[in-house]
Amino acid sequence: MTKKAPGSTKRRIDPSSDRPLFYSPFKDLDRKIAKAAKAKSEAKRESSDVAMLKSGLDNEDAIFREEMKDVIPLKNRRKRRFFESSCPKPPRFFVQEEDAEALAKLAELVAGYGKFDLTFSDEYVEGGVAGLNPIILSKLRNGDFSYQDFVDLHGLNKTEAREKVARFLHDSARKGYRCVLIVHGRGLHSDNKEPVIKSYIKTWLCKGEIGKMVLAFSSARPCDGGTGALYVLLRKKKFKL
């Protein structure tokens, strides 16, 4: 009879157990190797992307330095310098009203060239091309546009007055004037005490060659002749005789 060695025991294997009969230390080795290789590949790719980005930034920085190498930096960057233009300032007119004038010209194309909207009473006269911004008429009426020249029609008959107005407006347009004053009088010294020239002048300013130069007109303020004179706003374009 064989005797058992001291301390030795036999283990019985339970057939119903799920445990493997033999221990396999390399069973998951392939999967672990593949996982490690994948992680290494991703780390390498991220490292490569960072290197490329750094290289690109270095190149841009080098290009910038090359372009700016002749530029002398300001000693005091907090101070700003402002320079005034040497160009003469435009007359008080009206650079600000160019958009409104453009809209007025567009309205003329739609409504027919040279049409004026007129407002008048026994003494007061006001008119502007169709579609003109009412703000411009308001400024003209209030004397906000300083007139740059004037003509006096006292003592002239209808024909003489028309010729003088046409010549005066042509000369003013050629000089680039935008606002002028026409003094036509109130007719107080005429035979019938009526302003003869005034009754014609609003027609002259709305039609024909004279009308092509005019943007708007309005009776003047009392200090500039009142209802015996007209402020005339000329178009921006210079016309030829």
Image: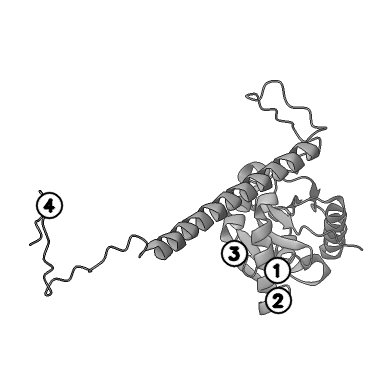
Between the C-alphas of marks 4 and 1, the distance is: 123 Å
Residue nearer the viewer, 167 or 31: 31
Furthest-front residue in this view: 1
Marks 2 and 1 in Cβ contact (< 8 Å): yes
Q: Position of residue 45 (x, y in %)?
A: 56, 55
The residue to which callout 3 is attached is 120
Residue 194 visible at all: no
- Tell me which amino acid carries mark 1: Lys
How dense is the environment of label 1, judged by Cα within 10 Å: few (below 14), some, or many (20 and up)?
Answer: many
How dense is the environment of label 4, judged by Cα within 10 Å: few (below 14), some, or many (20 and up)?
Answer: few
The residue to which callout 1 is attached is 105
Q: Position of residue 207 (x, y in %)?
A: 76, 71
Residue nearer the viewer, 149 or 1: 1
The residue to which callout 4 is attached is 5
- Tell me which amino acid carries mark 2: Leu
- Foreground disc of the pair 1, 3: 1
The residue to which callout 2 is attached is 109
Considering only order in the chain, which callout, 3 or 1, is on the residue closer to the N terminus?
1
Snapshot colouring: one colour
- Tell me which amino acid carries mark 3: Phe
